[in-house]
Amino acid sequence: MSANRYDVIVIGAGHNGLVTASYLAKAGQKVLVLEAGEQMGGAAQTREFAKGYRTSAVAHILHALHPKVIADLGLEGHGLRATQHRIGTSAMLPGGGRLDITDDKAATQASINRFSPADALAWHPRMERLVRLAGALGSFLMKTPPSPSPAANDFQTKLALGMFAVQLRLMGKKDMLELSRILTINVADLANDFFESDVIKGMLGLEATLGVYLGPRSPNTVFNLLYRLASLSQKHGQGGFYLPQGGMGAVVDALAKAATSAGVTIRTQAPVDHILIEKDAAVGVVLANGEECRAPVVASSADPQRTLLHLVQPGNLDTEFLRRMRHLRMNGCVAKVHLALDALPDVFRQAQGRMVVAPSTNYVEHAFDCAKYGRVSDNPALEIVIPTLTDPSLAPSGKHVASILCQYAPYKLRETTQDEARSQVLERTLNVLEQIAPGVRNQVAASEVLTPHDLEATFNLSGGQWHQGEVTLDQVFFLRPAASFQQYRMPLPGLWLCGAGAHPGGNVSGAAGANAAREILKDLKKTASKGAA
Amino acid sequence: MTHVQHLKPFLKKTPFHEPMEAMMHGAGWIRWQGYYSPAYFDSTQSEYMAARNGATVYDVSPLIKYAIRGKDAAKFANYLVTRDLTKVAPMNVAYTAWCDDDGRMIEEGTLFRLGPNDFLLNAALHQLHWLNESAYGFSVEIEEISEQLAGLSLQGPNSRVILEVLGVQGIGKLPHFGIMETTVDGHWLRIDRAGFTGDLGYEVWVKPQDAIWLWETLFRIGDPYKIAPMGGHALEMTRVEAGFILVDVDYIGAHHAIRPTQRVSPIEAGIGWAVALKKDAYFVGKRALQKEKAEGSSRFILSGIEIEGRKPAPGAFLYADEKGTKELGLTTSAMWSPLLKKNIAFAQIPIAYTKPGTEMWIEIWYPKEKKIERSMVKCWARNRMFFDPPRKKEVV
């Protein structure tokens, strides 16, 4: 039995689970990571979707992996090349034409100038300001959110909150007022305030709604935009979009190496059936094969619904808390489309590494209208990357892979079966692609579609939600996953949440995992000193 | 209590309405959960005396009843309520509280365990939403069966003999809080030995179509034993003597509270004995109640007090001293007990004052000749069960 005793058990070898495990192991804990799948990585993995063709299975662009996590865990020493392939963004117009946003300010201005001279002048000052505002919010990514009851906050949390207030004040009156004004409004209004060309407005509309069940005219979408922009500053992320060499799985490989070298035991194909509870506290887990593993600390990087509604068996948590968990907004609405291409259309080769198809606010809003009524968008908005341009090893020589996010394909469907949804996603995505790259349909040698239901089944993401719960104002910060339970500690003693379902939420950032590890260590220290006294 | 005239078009009649209507001498109808319910038939005092000296019949059909059945029923019920149901055998009644996440009491009532996985919850307030919410993940069926059963509460020193004459075999052996099912003259009966008067008494349940038979038979054979119908006002007197608390009178049900601080824990409501903090399984609010117990953070305990003099003292303030400089708490229900010849009340007082005999002062405002006068008199903490005769639990 003693072989199955650990100090900490981490459920799930996604990037957050591995981050938590590594931090804890570095602090001297004996850590076991249990992964249900054959492969580590969760939503951050590279996998073969057709013979010889590989791609990042879910998340495909690296931009938010927190620099502190990279440094603390020495990920670069374990092979991480986070900032090898920087990519710009091209807004692709159906029927031809595109707008390029790159690091080259003059080129970007010139590109926008073709659509609107006013926008060309406005772009950099406006976006820099948004990034500045987002940066103020970003400073809380690696902090534990404060508890609404002041007494529950330790000195560090109070200090963080104080520093946050100071930072907001230091932005100056104008920026602070602007942040207050835009924080809760919708991105369509913001885009109208700032710009005049449809192409820019549409692009912002997609950036602000990617991964949430909201349209550009839904309230609070500016918050989502700021959340995304926060990771685009070098302080809180990579400072831009990058395609990881070897796909997102390479990031996880580095994390796994860091974890293993810190002494973490990782077991794959070891699905947890339920959390073992004795005397009203979590004391370990029971695997699907009946095997018991014990540890006084169980940290789950699975999403809050999976952890609290399924892994914790009924009868161990309070009624209202469980209702809150059931009602978390987790309606995944992004499908992943993978195409194996015999040849790459020139349009894709000439564009920047990240292409978006969202030609106007109305285009995205109409796409959302379909989702609102439980249908796959007739004309989906797309984010496309061609990972084989930077890493040819992902496909047979001369061939290419397109990795596409198709928005919206809602989890909650009406009058559409799963199979219908899957074929609609492929068909409608190809239709849109055909409009920007005529003939591309004939190059498709193989394809794979992962609808939110497929994502749920394959990666154990409840609702097929990429971020383990939509990142919206009511589900972030001290409200993530629920008020009073935001400090990674769940009401069941011994159980912690260390995945994206906890603050600060989604993206391949590792921040939730790092924050959870910090809180767990704090708690272990407290218990140890109490034991000594 | 609301006068029912304007509600008449909406109120429903229980299966006992016809015979009750025939005995209704005054304008005694009030509403109880959407049904006509008698506040009194003739006079509250005579009904009270009948309860204490003969036997009374009170229509408990409007109680809201939930059947909880299914594979996980035992597990679910034990998770829902504060009592440890592993210690309650089938065919027994458990008086219990159920709480919200914060360990604040939603309501208390009786839970019948009819089988290993077959329960019946009796509540004064609607609870279906809460039960369904709490049942998430359990394999249980919860059904409101309020109108599938009609019930009379037969209470008083003569209640047993009436059931014996009725022909209920083995009624003398039915223990306090026991349940039995039997057939009399071809009518199915469920009898549980519990009630709201604190005396020897039973609740008799029948199918609604047998209600008239039950009423008429009880009154026919009960006549020599001074059987009488009883209304809610007399019941109110007996339940205060018996020390039983009432939702939204002696405590605010957690879902009715306007301010969170109005909610009370079962410990504060004086039924801490019904909270099994040591039971193996978790129950809703357990962690919060364990914390309350460990920190000693109960704000008060609802206790019995006996008051000098005869002036009833509902809603009166209690003080540690005659000058009233240190306020201790407040009374909820209060009455002059004709049987005990005592002025009694329930009071929310700090735990340090709950030891029987502890002297306190109480400020009573009372009407006298069209004026409101104040009196500051002594009172003493008492066991809240002022009336607790040995026959209540006696088995013969």
Image (cartoon, rainbow, N blue to C red):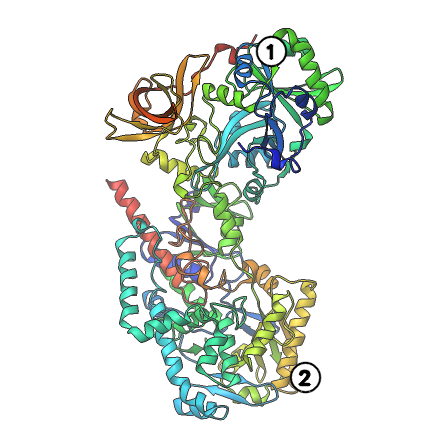
- Residue nearer the viewer, B193 or A433: B193
User: What is the C-alpha distance between the residues marked 2 and 1?
Assistant: 90 Å
Label 2 resides on the chain identified as A
Which marked residue is nearer to the observer: mark 2 or mark 1? 1
Q: Residues within 10 Å of mark 2 (few under 14, many from 20)?
A: few
Look at the numbered disc 2 and give the secondary structure of its residue: helix
Label 1 resides on the chain identified as B
Q: Position of residue B118 (x, y in %)?
A: 62, 30
Residue A449 image-quadrant placement: bottom right
- Residue nearer the viewer, A64 or B136: B136
In percent of the image, x 45 and y 87: which residue is there? Answer: A119
Furthest-front residue in this view:
B370
- Residue nearer the viewer, B26 or B390: B26
Q: Position of residue B217 (x, y in %)?
A: 70, 14
Which residue corresponds to mark 1? B160
Which residue corresponds to mark 2? A442
- Up the image or down, A325 lies above or below B253; here it is below
Q: Is residue B66 visible?
A: no
Q: Amino acid at mark 2?
A: Asn
Look at the numbered disc 1 and give the secondary structure of its residue: helix
The tally of labels here is 2
Residue B348 image-quadrant placement: top left
Q: Is residue A314 visible?
A: yes
In percent of the image, x 56 and y 40: which residue is there? Answer: B131
Asked if the residue under mark 1 is in contact with the one under mark 2, i.e. CB atoms within 8 Å, the reply is no
Q: Residues within 10 Å of mark 1 (few under 14, many from 20)?
A: many
Q: Position of residue B323 (x, y in %)?
A: 23, 26
